[in-house]
Image (cartoon, grey):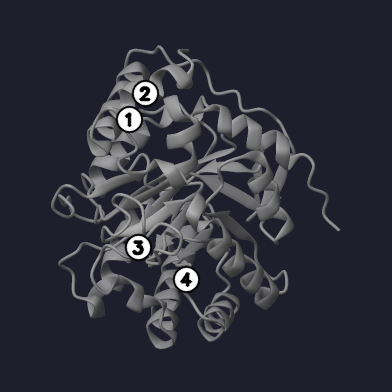
Amino acid sequence: MIPYCLVRPFAFALDPETAHELTIGSMAALGRIGLVPPYRPPHAAPVSVMGLEFPNRVGLAAGLDKNGEAIDALAGWGFGFVEIGTVTPRPQPGNPKPRLFRLPEAQGIINRMGFNNHGVDALIRNVQAARYKGILGINIGKNFDTPIEKAADDYLACLDKVYAHSGYVAVNISSPNTQNLRQLQGESELDALLGALKARQAELAQRHGKYVPLALKIAPDLDDTQIGNIADALRRHRIDAVIATNTTLSREGVEHLPHGDEAGGLSGAPLFEKSTGVLRRLTSALAGELPVIAAGGITDGAKALAKLEAGAALVQLYSGLIYRGPDLVRECAQACTKFRVV
């Protein structure tokens, strides 16, 4: 494998979305012709979460491989689990380009992609073609033109189709790039959505003869009251896990940088403190009743360990990979071995 430090200058010379598409396309092609080595994750700090056995605590966050095209190649980086998506019932192009921006001085990314994906049927075909046998999360969302009052229909349609192919299903109600989506984090909207999802989960578990956990992905832009309401809803509906967090609308610390004022969600290093603050308050409110998967700003092993110490059971990487490459996965997996549950 070519060291990432040699690849990065060429990738960063390209438009960010072009570089992303070339990377995923190349990895997908290697997988199709069998040039990806068998999946052998480092068994560093194995852990049981959501009733699943993870070989290590470090996963890939949704968004990098929206359509599940490069599952085998990405799994070879050493992740303990891989999450693909966000996928919607119907294909959609996403928001107008340009919509992806690097902030290298801050190790940050701003995106306003808008759930661009090939649709759930295409994703399932890719999952079926993959050789990966590890834990696969599939992240589901709603189409941009589905009215918010009909959003549950889209989530249920996706859940029906991905259930049999998933290790767990992540429910994305927190992207800032689909109009009104974060409205689903409101108390009454969330209650109705979670109730519908849990009822369908029970039906599907009986139909398929297996229980597939549900995880809810939330935003970092929440106050204490909102966090408390979400924690209450998660407990009440017996949701299996929560992912904290998605990208932020805040521009604190990057407003002076080139592209720092672009619309969309900010991820990477500038998100770390905000997302970790939500993580701490959320784990406190949940009082250990369900696990939290932490995402947001993990750019080195120390930050991965800090997420565990703040209450997370697992961590996920995305933007840090853009700046650090595959070595970040193993660094974080090794750092997580230092975590001791007290």
Looking at the image, which residue is at 25% across and 52% down? 113
* Amino acid type at image mark 4: Lys
* Amino acid type at image mark 2: Pro
First of labels 1, 4 by sequence position: 1
**Alpha carbons under labels 3 and 4: distance apart:** 21 Å
Looking at the image, which residue is at 29% across and 46% down? 101
Residue annotated with mark 3: 175
- Kindly state the secondary structure of the residue where label 4 is placed: helix
Residue 242 sits above or below residue 332 on the image: below
Viewer-side label of 3, 1: 1
Q: Position of residue 25 (x, y in %)?
A: 27, 26
Residue annotated with mark 2: 9
Quarter of the view holding residue 170? bottom left
Q: Answer with left or right where residue 31 lies relative to residue 100.
A: right
First of labels 3, 1 by sequence position: 1
**Alpha carbons under labels 1 and 4: distance apart:** 43 Å
Q: Quadrant of the C terminus?
A: bottom right
Residue annotated with mark 1: 12
How packed mark 2 is, by other alpha carbons closer than 10 Å (few <14, some 14-19, many 20 or more), is few
